[in-house]
Image: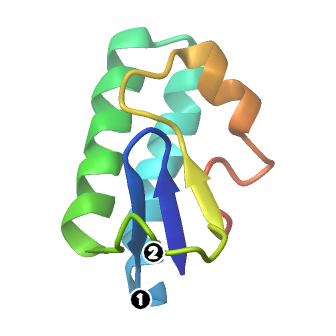
């Protein structure tokens, strides 16, 4: 799956990694619902770090659309809330 981190670029991420990423996404959603700003910030950073570690960076001139868009590392709780679906940031 092609994943974009806003402001950073795209990575190709194998579907096999989504179970691990969904755990972090669930934590992030719970922290957002609880209004836990520090927890939200910590978990967002952990989620984005894992996507960077597990994904293969795509060249800047790669022109395929992203299948999943994640917020930038400095996104606010309100900005991330706008990106959420029922499943959180990551479907599944």
Residue drawn at 36 percent across, 31 percent down: 73
Q: Nearer the viewer, mark 2 or mark 1?
A: 1
Total numbered circles: 2
In the rendered structure, find residue 62 and report the number of the disc placed on it. none
Residue 83 appears in the picture as rendered: yes
Secondary structure under badge 1? helix
- The answer to whether residue 10 is above or below residue 75 is below
Quarter of the figure with residue 55: bottom left
Q: What is the crowding at mark 1: few (fewer than 14 residues within 10 Å), some, or many (at least 20)?
A: few
Task: Report the residue marked by disc 1.
Answer: 16
Quarter of the figure with residue 14: bottom left
Q: Left or right of 17: which side holds 81?
A: right
Q: Are marks 2 and 1 in contact (CB under 8 Å)?
A: yes
Task: Report the residue marked by disc 2.
Answer: 19
Single out the residue that lies furthest toward the front. Answer: 61
Residue drawn at 48 percent across, 87 percent down: 15
In space, the residues marked 2 and 1 are separated at their CA atoms by 7 Å
Single out the residue that lies furthest toward the right. Answer: 86
Q: What is the crowding at mark 2: few (fewer than 14 residues within 10 Å), some, or many (at least 20)?
A: few
Q: Nearer the viewer, residue 25 or 67?
A: 67
Residue 90 appears in the picture as rendered: no
Q: Left or right of 87: which side holds 46?
A: left
Q: Position of residue 7 (x, y in %)?
A: 44, 38
Which quadrant: the N terminus?
A: bottom right
Q: Position of residue 60 (x, y in %)?
A: 39, 64
Q: Nearer the viewer, residue 10 or 49?
A: 10
Which quadrant: the C terminus?
A: bottom right
Residue drawn at 69 percent across, 26 percent down: 81
Q: Left or right of 91: which side holds 38?
A: left
Q: Position of residue 88 (x, y in %)?
A: 66, 47
Residue drawn at 35 percent across, 22 percent down: 41
Secondary structure under badge 2? helix
């Amino acid at each position: 799956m092609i994943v974009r981190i806003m402001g950073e670029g795209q990575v190709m991420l194998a579907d096999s990694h989504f179970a691990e990423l969904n755990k972090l996404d669930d934590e992030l959603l719970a922290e957002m619902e609880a209004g836990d700003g520090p927890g939200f910030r910590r978990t967002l950073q952990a989620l984005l770090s894992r996507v960077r570690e597990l994904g293969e960076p795509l060249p800047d001139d790669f022109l395929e659309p992203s299948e999943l868009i994640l917020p930038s590392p400095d996104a606010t709780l309100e900005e991330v809330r706008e990106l959420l679906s029922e499943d959180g940031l990551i479907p599944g």
